Amino acid sequence: MALFALQLYTLRDSYQNPEEFSSLLGEVKALGFSGVELAGSGGLSAEQLKARLDELGLVAVCSHEMPDRLSDHLDEVIAFHQAIGCNKIAIAWSPAASEEDLVQLVARVAYVKPVLAAAGIDLLYHNHDHEFKQVGSGQAIEQIARHLDLEVDTYWVFAAGQDVPAWLQAHRDQIQLLHIKDGDRERHPCALGEGENTIEAILAMADQLGIDWLIVENDNPDPDGLSDVARSMAYLHKLGRI
């Protein structure tokens, strides 16, 4: 059975300094998570972050980076990820509304992906729903997936009107990680079990595909990150997943 990590972007409003961020990691562990996905370091140095994660027994499963940071600060990004022992980076978001957008993204990928690979780091793409629109010869996500493996955000696949388990099955060879996320059909993410996404079927498909890490995230937690995440974990406990 897969392990669960938390995308720390969910808790972005729950700390104001490195000390609070470090303390928050302890609360993440106490909720039952085995790993984290980074969206920044919370103000901690790589060495401080690595020590805190090791202290808590949390794995740095992946991190999110923007395309321009990858191309403009690649040496710094590599050094940070090697220092914390994180071997996956997902492009957090990219424009994908035009063929020009996709050409620019592919050019960045062609530059940074082999350099990251030589440093022992896989580069993935994290989707939203805008990549499911037709751009030129096909959906943007299909064109992106020719160049990158995927970290599939299952809520945004749902919000794009797809049958999520079927889409995962069809792209099984391109998927390394999954974001497990609920929400309604009006582009409003929510805690697990409180929306309309097919979470139980998605979890079953994740088992079938042999995905090692499932990452919980809520872009807009209510009323705050920790309480929202706690409800998601209670739901996973109810399903016998934790």
Image (spheres, rainbow, N blue to C red):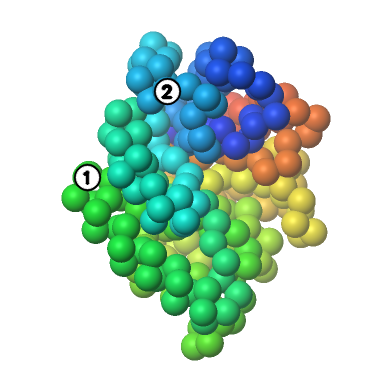
Amino acid on which the number 1 mark rests in the picture: Ala
Q: Badge 1: few (under 14), some or many (20 or more) residues near its Cα, within 10 Å?
A: some
Of 12 and 235, which appears nearest the observer? Answer: 12
Q: Quadrant of residue 115?
A: bottom left
Amino acid on which the number 2 mark rests in the picture: Ser
The residue lying at 36 percent from left, 63 percent from top is 109
Which residue is denoted by mark 1 in the rendering? 119
Instruction: Please provide percent x and percent y for residue 59.
Output: 38, 27
Instruction: Please provide percent x and percent y for residue 12.
Output: 64, 32
The N terminus, quarter of image: top left
Which residue is denoted by mark 2 in the rendering? 45
The residue positioned farthest toward the left in the image shown: 118
The residue lying at 30 percent from left, 36 percent from top is 79
Above or below — where is 224 with respect to 2? above
| Left or right of residue 159, residue 118 in this image | left
Above or below — where is 34 with respect to 202? above
Alpha-carbon span between mark 2 and mark 1:
20 Å
Q: Is residue 164 visible?
A: no
Above or below — where is 56 with respect to 181? above
Of 115 and 165, which appears nearest the observer? Answer: 115
Instruction: Please provide percent x and percent y for residue 217.
Output: 60, 40
Name the mark on residue 145: none
The residue positioned farthest toward the bottom in the image shown: 137
